[in-house]
Image (cartoon, rainbow, N blue to C red):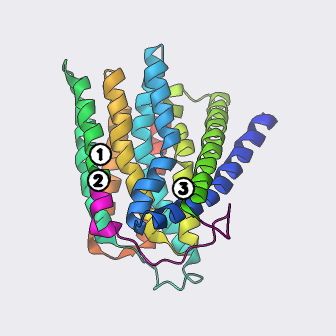
Amino acid sequence: MLITLLLFFGSAVAIYLACEYFVNGIEWCGQHMKLGATAVGSVLAAFGTALPESAVTFTAVVFGQTPEQKDIGVGAAMGGPLVLATIAYGIVGLVWWLNRNRLKASGYIIDADGRALAKDQIAFLGLFIVKVSLGLIAFAWKPWLGVLFLSAYAVYVWREIRSEHGQAEDAELEPLKLRPSKPGFQWAALQVGLALLVIAGASHVFVSQLEAIGALAGLSPHLVALLLSPVATELPEAMNAIIWVRQGKAKLALANISGAMMIQASIPSALGLFFTPWRFDATLLVSGLVTGLAMVVMLVLFRRGRMDARALTAVGLLYGLFAGWLCLS
């Protein structure tokens, strides 16, 4: 048990430190590619940090030998958006709230382009509604619809890069950690690649130790897949959010979460449709309803154009309510 806990906390620290290098390198990559904060967060950073949870779904649905193992993949595909829509956004609100004086913020209002992010939420909600609806019905050609989810994500990436929010911005960047004197694109890309390797390896250790803790606590594999594993695999997004918000770059943090949610609504869903029957039980359906509720609340906040850190923090509590219901049911 002691070794499990040491590996658990050690891997969490490794993920945080690697994320420090990742966000620093990805910002320099974005500047060299002449991308703005929204595109950097929603496309470049989101794609990199979404690798651990996508790998969990891929491994479970493609190489799983039993229905229970494939169910873990489906649970992870639903748990990822749930964690992002609640805990990840809640972390942004909480960290901003706690650091508002140091950031010289205007009260509890977060400085970010909420109206631009609202467009992402509408796209996610539309895709997510289709994703959940397909889990309630069965028909022979359902697997082919996975192609539509992959196409939807490709369109999203194209729109983000081509949009007016994807233009280069004159933001002050910290020196590149790997090569401060010569922050060329090659060095920035190398730093991002090395950081991703550490994040992937540490995330694998973190997930395995979390599953071991779940087994010691007597939790079922289905519960671990829906609750604990997504929390672990979404840790890079959470760490990025903490780092960027503390630096006063809430736009990057929110865009990273928004982009990761689009990935979670499309790529794991496509894998699930390709390799499983994609049928939901009551637990998965409730998780989808909680995710949808959280996103509706976020959409309202974003459309107002003035995001209150206290409201974002409260959204994170929805995950606790769902966890409590799941443990008692």
Q: Which residue is mark 3?
A: 238
Quadrant of the image occupied by residue 71: top left
Q: Which residue is mark 2?
A: 158
Regarding mark 1 in the picture, which secondary structure is present there? Answer: helix
**How much space separates mark 1 and mark 2, taking CA atoms?**
6 Å
Name the residue type under label 1: Ala
Regarding mark 2 in the picture, which secondary structure is present there? Answer: helix
Q: Is residue 99 above or below residue 280?
A: below
**How much space separates mark 1 and mark 3, taking CA atoms?**
24 Å
> Magenta stretch mostly in which secondary structure?
loop
Q: Is residue 114 left or right of residue 325?
A: left
Residue placed most toward the observer, 217 or 302: 302
Name the residue type under label 2: Trp
Marks 1 and 3 close (CB-CB < 8 Å): no
Please give the name of the residue rendered at 48% of the width and 19% of the height, measured from the top-left corner.
Answer: 63
The span shown in magenta is: 158-183
